[in-house]
Image (cartoon, grey):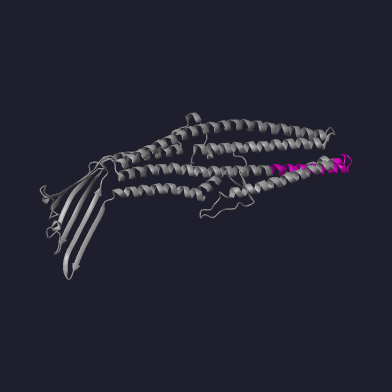
Amino acid sequence: MIKAFFLLLFFALSSSLCAQVDSLENLGFKEYLSLVKQNHPIVKQANLIGETGDAKLLKARGGFDPKIEVDFDQKVFKETEYYDLLNATFKIPTWYGIDLKAQFEQNEGYYLNPQNTVPENGLYTAGISASLGQGLWINDRMTTLKQAKIYREQARADLDIAVNVVLYEASVAYFEWLQAYKKVKLFDRFLENSQLRFRGIKSSALAGDKPLIDTTEATISVQSRALNLREVQLEYTKKKLELANFLWLGNNIPVELQDGIFPQEELGFSIDEILDITGFDLANFQLEQHPKLRSLNFKVEALELERQLKANNLLPVIDVNYNFISSEGDDLSTFYTQNYKAGLRFKMPLFLRKERGDLKLAKLKVQNSQFELTNSKLELQNKLRAVTTELEVLEEQNKLAAELVRNYETMLYAEERKYQVGESSIFLINSREVKLIDAQLKQIEITNKFYKAKANLFKTIATNPDSI
């Protein structure tokens, strides 16, 4: 009769529990990270890094845009036109220190400066201006454009790092939530077991098959499990709220997790695929392709361009220009070499102290960035060795913890069988159960560390998976 009661009660509780599980809605790890990557404000802010790089490149290219300039001056006093000056210029900057220029000039007036005197229909000019010293092989606009291209690539590397950090922190929050959820399920299951055991012992004690003191021991077990359950439920609520910090809708509205949403319990090998770390091999890892090292390499390249520009400033300024002039702009054959306008400008400081100081500072910046690059490469190598070693150790611990749990389950089952035939006590059953609970908690903790170590590897190699 007592055994039949136990079986009926067990099947009733099992059916109830299965109905609850079937009605749960899981928030999968991949879906969760996809939501974070799409909608989290920090990720959106990180995307501005790439847009900023594109904007800087667009701005730098503007230094080579053709330009139209029109200058018009007029002075009239007491009905006398002193002067009327019109100067329109079209200029095309080129890559090196050469500018192509076309100009139209028309001037008239009673007090016109003689050098501004032009034919009645105006004067047309076509020519070039060039820098033969500073600015011939490298100048400000060339450097700015080259640096802007470098900064755009650097921005993409920095974007990968910034998004990776957010996804890493979101992953850790998910694993903490998952760990708390597993603890709740664990203590909820053992609370049901202790309640079931209490009811069976109470029935047996009332029937005279078991001593009444066993009901007190069983009551203590129920109360202890209930207390533990409340503790982990509180922890679960906290972790769920921490996870909600990473969940947003597309219009920057934060999302609060409903009570019916639960984490994906078993991640298995899918976590490697989601985090894009499947088959990671430290020996074959291309360290130079790491986003941080690429970013630092781009930084060194940009500073090297600045150093070249500062070195170029040691040269004298030698600007020349030569322009053909004609009064008939629509007839190219009228531009004779005999009619021209030319100029030369030369400038050079005697001691070059400012220029030499700028060059020295530029060299120091390059050296500083190279030291930073070397140090970062070593740090990255050591971090990768550390995290891969940690993963190997945790994988072994996970297997040992699983075996330990199975052995404690066997011991508990054996103790319960012995109790049924009167060869054990409820105290020993509770002791075995406590050991099993501790082992399962340890297993949950090690699994959580294992997941975090995988996330740490993901963060260390700084990937930004396209699959998310």
Asked if the magenta segment contains residue 105, the reply would be: no
Left or right: 72 as drawn, with respect to 177: left
- Residue sitting nearer the eye, 14 or 222: 222
Residue in view at x 15 percent, y 57 percent? 116
Q: To which quarter of the image does residue 302 belong? A: top left
Left or right: 217 as drawn, with respect to 400: right
Left or right: 457 as drawn, with respect to 206: left
Q: x%, y% of residue 114?
A: 13, 58
Residue extending furthest toward the top: 283
Left or right: 286 as drawn, with respect to 195: left
Residue in view at x 78 percent, y 38 percent? 430
Residue 279 visible to the viewer: no
Q: x%, y% of residue 49?
A: 44, 47
Residue extending furthest toward the left: 338
| Residue interval drawn in magenta | 185-213
- Residue sitting nearer the eye, 152 or 419: 152
- Residue sitting nearer the eye, 28 or 33: 33
Q: x%, y% of residue 412?
A: 76, 34
Q: To which quarter of the image does residue 184 belong? A: top right
Give the main secondary structure, helix, strand or loop, of the magenta stretch: helix
Number of marks in the rendered image: 0
Residue extending furthest toward the bottom: 78
Dividing the image into 4 quarters, which one contains the N terminus?
A: top right
Rendered position, 458 above or below 59? above
Asked if the magenta segment contains residue 194, the reply would be: yes
Residue 392 visible to the viewer: yes
Q: x%, y% of residue 19?
A: 69, 47
- Residue sitting nearer the eye, 7 or 455: 455
